[in-house]
Structure formats: C-alpha cells, structure tokens
Amino acid sequence: MRKLLLFCLFALLPSITKAQVGEYRTDFAVGVNGGYVLSNVGFTPDVPQRMLGGMTAGVTFRYTCEKYFKSICAIVAEVNIAQVGWKEDIMGLEDQPLYYEGDANALHYERKMTYLQIPLFARLGWGRERKGLQGFFQIGPQFGIFMNESTNTNLVEGKSPTETRSSTIVAQESMPVEKKFEYGIVGGAGIEFSMPKVGHFLLEGRYYYGLGNLYGNTKSDYFAKSNFGQIVIKATYLFDIVKTKNDKIK
C-alpha cells in the first residue's frame, strides 16, 4: 500500500506542479500620474501639527508577469516629484504683538520640502485586465532624495514666543534638513478601468510611513525621531507598450 501511494504521488507530481504555475504575462505599460499629498513629521519630543498639503506628479512603469488563479501579479515603479513637510499648530495671543506679524489668531509656521520619490510596488489585482474594472492592492519600499525646502511663517525672526504657543519645542524651525536620503514603506489600494486601444485609468489612495529621519537621532541630537507620514490620493494613466498575445485574456 505504501509503495502504491508513493507511485501515485510521483505520477501526479508533474500535473500538480503544472496546475500550480500561473498563466504567464509579458505586459508592459508606461504613463503619467498626479495627485495630492497630506504630510506631517513624527517628532520626538512631540511637536503639535496639522497635515500640510502639497502636489505630487511623475511617471509610472508597470510590468504584469502572471495571473495566478484570480490574482493578477505585477511590479510597479514610479519616479515622482512631491511637495511634503509639516505645519505647526500654534496658538497666538493678541496681547503679544511683538512676536508675530499680521493676525495674532493666525500665528503659523510651515516647512515645505521637495523630494524626488521612487516607490517600488508588488501589486495584486482582481478583475478585468483588458476591458472593464479591476481592483488592486500594492505595497513596497519607497526611497526619497531631498531637493530643496522653503518656510512660510509670520513669526518674527529673533523672537521666541514660547508663552503664546501650544508647545515649547521650537528647535526644528531653525534646523535645516540633515538627512538628504529617506526611506520607508508605502502601501495602498485602488481601482483601475481599462479600455482597449485607449489605456488604463487608475485612482488610488496610499499611505507612506518613513523609517528614516530628517535629523540625527543619536543621544547627543535634539530629536530622537523625525520621520514622515504621508497620505496620498493619486490618479494615473497608463498605455500599453507590450501586450501578451492571448485571445482569452479579458
């Protein structure tokens, strides 16, 4: 009986292996993307903030390699320019006119930074490939290269209105970015609508969590942590460069 079971197992092994292999694809598409980013920085010690809005745009590359059961597997890469940063939640007082310019009740400070961002995704989709609707989920690493920065504030330089503020942590306002390279994990989900001979239209939301810091985080540094958090809403248009020749693909 044991020999018979072993014989049956080895006899069925090639067919089992073949059944587990998905339907291969060699689809390659490129296109453009654009969207809106809400970002802040997780400081330790904590700095009260609101999300800072900015724009993002770039190019997208997608290689679809396999359909495994119902899942459409692909690798996605982007090269984007993004405006990110933080906006501090500052409370102004009308009886402290020397510490600000303009409306005391609108005391503000924001730092906007421009990054070259390169996210790399492993993508799974479910639905139509060539014509119709598809839902997808993707996750992977993201790398960022600092390009430039600007500030917008009505605080008067040289003054320190700590008694009028929701926080006494102000060192970050005069510190330039120290770490020019940053990295983290990004993931999101969305929908895609495909039209033959026209292309693919995508709408998605994603979240990025930075694993690197803007400033040094040793015991001698001021901040123990200064990493990005970003919410992105993005639209993408892709057109096919290479398509798998298979009439059964829908």
Image (cartoon, rainbow, N blue to C red):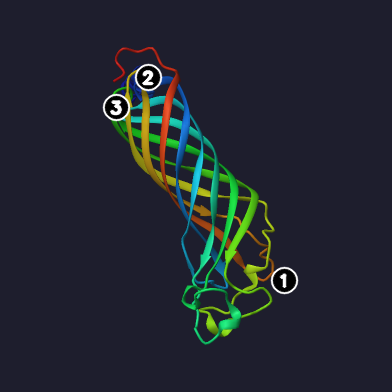
On the image, the x and y values in percent for residue 140 come to: 49, 42
User: Local crowd at mark 3 within 10 Å, few (<14), some, or many (≥20)?
Assistant: some
Instruction: Tell which circle, 2 or 3, labels the residue nearer the N-terminal end.
Output: 2
Amino acid type shown at disc 2: Lys
Q: Residue at x 49, y 84 (%)?
A: 94
Mark-to-mark CA distance, 1 and 3? 55 Å
Quarter of the rendering containing residue 150: bottom right
Amino acid type shown at disc 3: Arg
In the rendered view of the protein, which quadrant contains the C terminus? top left
Which labelled disc corresponds to residue 220?
Answer: 1
Asked if residue 112 can be seen in this view, the reply is: yes
Which labelled disc corresponds to residue 18?
Answer: 2
Say whether marks 2 and 3 touch (CB < 8 Å). Answer: no
Is disc 2 placed on a helix, strand or loop?
helix
Mark-to-mark CA distance, 2 and 3? 24 Å
Horizontal side of 130 relative to 119 (left or right) equals left
On the image, the x and y values in percent for residue 58 come to: 52, 37
Q: Residue at x 37, y 28 (%)?
A: 200
Image position of 89 with respect to 98: above or below: above
In this view, the residue in front, 122 or 107, is 107
In this view, the residue in front, 82 or 161, is 161
On the image, the x and y values in percent for residue 77 come to: 51, 34
Instruction: Tell which circle, 1 or 3, labels the residue nearer the N-terminal end.
Output: 3
Amino acid type shown at disc 1: Ser
Q: Residue at x 37, y 35 (%)?
A: 202
Mark-to-mark CA distance, 2 and 1? 59 Å
- Of all residues, the one furthest to the right in this rendering is 220
